[in-house]
Image: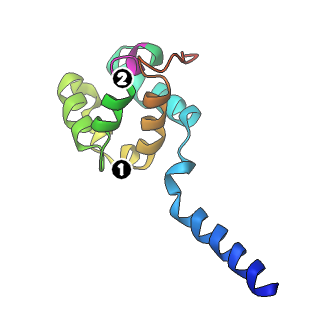
Amino acid sequence: MKKIIGLLISAFFILGLMSTNSFADAAKGQKYFLKYMKEGSGMTGAKFATEHTQAEWKALFEGKGEKFVAAYSKKYPSLEAFLKGDKFEKFMPDIKDFCVEFASDSGNVPSC
């Protein structure tokens, strides 16, 4: 009985460590967009997030978000410093979740 409980606890612990992407948060991503990207893009969060579908956002943010950084640095030169900086790398999972959560095909509308 102790071995089974020990195995279950170990399995949940390992599973928790493996699912780091589950810690990303669309609400945090919305705050980061408002703080760091709204002025540079000249768009509201709702307009920004609906530029692409969920699949398109996921493709743009694939890996370390190189495609997103390249596309949006070119489209909005004033965002280039942020997009190529350490803060974006840190906030990218949350910004990705924000974009996917409120994509044009999601049916959700952010409050910003």
Which of the two residues, 31 or 63, is positioned nearer the viewer here?
63
Q: Write down the quadrant of residue 49 in the picture.
A: top left
Residue 74 position, x and y percent, is 17, 27
Which of the two residues, 58 or 67, is positioned nearer the viewer here?
58
Q: Secondary structure at mark 1?
A: helix
**Which residue type does callout 2 highlight?**
Thr
Report the residue at 54% width, 30% height from top.
31
Residue wearing tag 1: 86
Which of the two residues, 106 or 79, is positioned nearer the viewer here?
106
Residue 48 inside the magenta-drawn segment: yes
Report the residue at 47% width, 36% height from top.
97
Residue wearing tag 2: 53
Residue lying farthest right?
Answer: 1
Residue 88 position, x and y percent, is 37, 43
- Point out the tag, 1 or 2, that comes first from the N-terminus: 2
Residue 84 position, x and y percent, is 27, 43
Which quadrant, please, contains the C terminus? top right
Q: What colour-coding does the image apply?
A: rainbow
Report the residue at 35% width, 50% height from top.
86
Q: Nearer the viewer, mark 1 or mark 2?
A: 2
The residues colored magenta run 47-52
**Which residue type does callout 1 highlight?**
Asp
Q: Write down the quadrant of residue 71 in the picture.
A: top left
Side of 53 where 80 appears, left or right: left
Q: CA distance from mark 1 to mark 2?
A: 26 Å
How packed is label 2: few (under 14 Cα within 10 Å), some, or many (20 or more)? some
Residue 43 inside the magenta-drawn segment: no
Q: Which mark is residue 56?
A: none
Q: Is residue 55 above or below residue 47?
A: below
Side of 103 where 30 appears, left or right: right
Q: Secondary structure at mark 2?
A: loop
Q: Write down the quadrant of residue 65 in the picture.
A: top left
